[in-house]
Image (cartoon, rainbow, N blue to C red):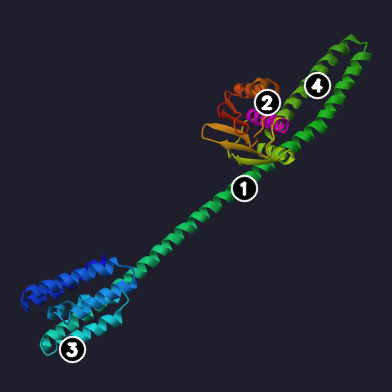
């Protein structure tokens, strides 16, 4: 740390006193008291204790002349503790007290050393302030970058959701157009061909009409399959579950939805059916005031869990087949998933379905 580095340099500089004075017990006491003062000012955080340490050291200088050699260290510690006036006054008083006993050369040496100490403390304080400001600026910048990254992520997720919603709406529109227009035309054509086959007496035309009837029926079946697939793909699981939770009036239904990937249509319909049946069971067999529906996506599976806070459950394990749980389990088993229930402290359903469920 710069504090101890500066004071170590000042201490070595002050030890030049060994060439001018005697290395007796008083000099050793001055060195030890200086070390104690430095450590005390650094370890004490209370201002009044720091002032007490500095005052005790300054007054000790009137008892031991060798203290004046370490006044530069005293000046540095006084400035670093915010007690500049105290340090300067005690230093001046000590120098004046021993002015008749020390030479002008030593006075100039002490004055130069004290100026160096003050300059070093000023640079260290300025460096510390700049370092702290830099650290604060860096932390603020990192925090802003994290917030910006989070906002960008939310914007991208919102854009993806809006695009997916637009695609699903367009699929629904196309399915309706095919069903309402092309489907009706084909249905009318099939009826007309059937009527023509009924009234036709020409054997040559019968073969043609039969072929036309087969072609129209094949086209109708293809259109029905396409419309059905378009409708299945356009089902938005989140919107359906939100609608089910919003329409559930028996108690409060809370939906937690954390899925970003596309969910296979088989899993969608499985989850929708299970949620419908589970909500019906809550209204029929529980006195819950809240039910929580959670849908999450994991790297290898989809998870659905439902739990309520009902305390008086009106069915036991023998009633399981009568409340649709068997059907739920069969649906999950068909997707190679796991199905677990618990009826302690409320009713809980926990389902996991692997993403590769085909």
* Residue corresponding to mark 3: 96
Q: Are marks 4 and 1 in contact (CB under 8 Å)?
A: no
Q: CA distance from mark 2 to mark 3?
A: 98 Å
The part of the image, by quadrant, that contains residue 105 is: bottom left
The residue nearer to you, when weighing 313 against 277, is 313
| Numbered disc in front, either 2 or 1 | 2
Secondary structure of the residue carrying numbered label 2: loop
Provide the residue designation for mark 4.
216
Q: Which mark is residue 315?
A: 2
User: Seen in the image, is 131 located left or right of residue 41?
Assistant: right
- Residue at figure coordinates x 26%, y 80% from the top left: 87
Look at discs 4 and 2 and give the one toward the viewer: 2
Few, some or many residues within 10 Å of mark 1 (<14, 14–19, 20+): few
Q: Secondary structure at mark 3?
A: helix
Query: Which one is earlier in the sequence, the residue at label 4 or at label 1?
Result: 1
Q: Earlier in the sequence, mark 2 or mark 3?
A: 3
Secondary structure under the numbered disc 4 in the rendered image: helix
């Amino acid at each position: 740390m710069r504090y101890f580095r500066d004071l170590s340099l000042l201490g070595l500089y002050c030890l030049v006193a060994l060439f001018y004075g005697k290395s007796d017990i008083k000099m050793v006491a001055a060195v030890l008291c200086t070390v104690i003062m430095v450590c005390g000012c650094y370890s004490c955080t209370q201002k009044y204790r720091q002032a007490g340490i500095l005052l005790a050291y300054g007054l000790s200088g009137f008892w031991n002349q060798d203290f004046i050699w370490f006044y530069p260290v005293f000046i540095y510690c006084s400035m670093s503790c915010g007690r500049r006036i105290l340090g300067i006054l005690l230093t001046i008083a000590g120098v004046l007290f021993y002015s008749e006993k020390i030479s002008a050369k030593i006075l100039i040496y002490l004055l130069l050393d004290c100026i160096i100490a003050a300059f070093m403390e000023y640079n260290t304080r300025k460096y510390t302030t700049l370092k702290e400001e830099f650290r604060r600026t860096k932390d603020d910048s990192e925090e802003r970058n994290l917030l910006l990254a989070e906002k960008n992520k939310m914007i991208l997720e919102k854009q993806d959701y809006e695009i997916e919603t637009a695609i699903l709406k367009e699929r629904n529109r196309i399915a309706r157009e095919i069903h309402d227009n092309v489907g009706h035309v084909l249905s009318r054509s099939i009826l007309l061909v059937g009527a023509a086959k009924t009234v036709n007496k020409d054997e040559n035309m019968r073969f043609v009409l039969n072929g036309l009837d087969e072609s129209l029926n094949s086209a109708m079946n293809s259109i029905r399959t396409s419309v059905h697939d378009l409708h299945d793909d356009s089902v938005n699981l989140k919107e359906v579950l939100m609608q089910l939770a919003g329409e559930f009036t028996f108690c409060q239904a809370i939906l937690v939805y954390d899925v970003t990937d596309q969910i296979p249509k088989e899993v969608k319909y499985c989850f929708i059916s299970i949620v419908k049946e589970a909500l019906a069971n809550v209204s029929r067999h529980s006195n819950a005031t809240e039910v929580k529906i959670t849908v999450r996506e994991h790297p290898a599976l989809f998870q659905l869990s439902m739990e309520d806070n009902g305390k008086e459950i009106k069915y036991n394990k023998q009633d399981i087949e009568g409340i649709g749980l068997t059907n739920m389990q069969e649906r999950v088993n068909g997707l190679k998933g796991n199905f677990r229930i618990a009826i302690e402290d409320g009713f809980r359903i926990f389902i996991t379905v692997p993403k590769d469920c085909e």
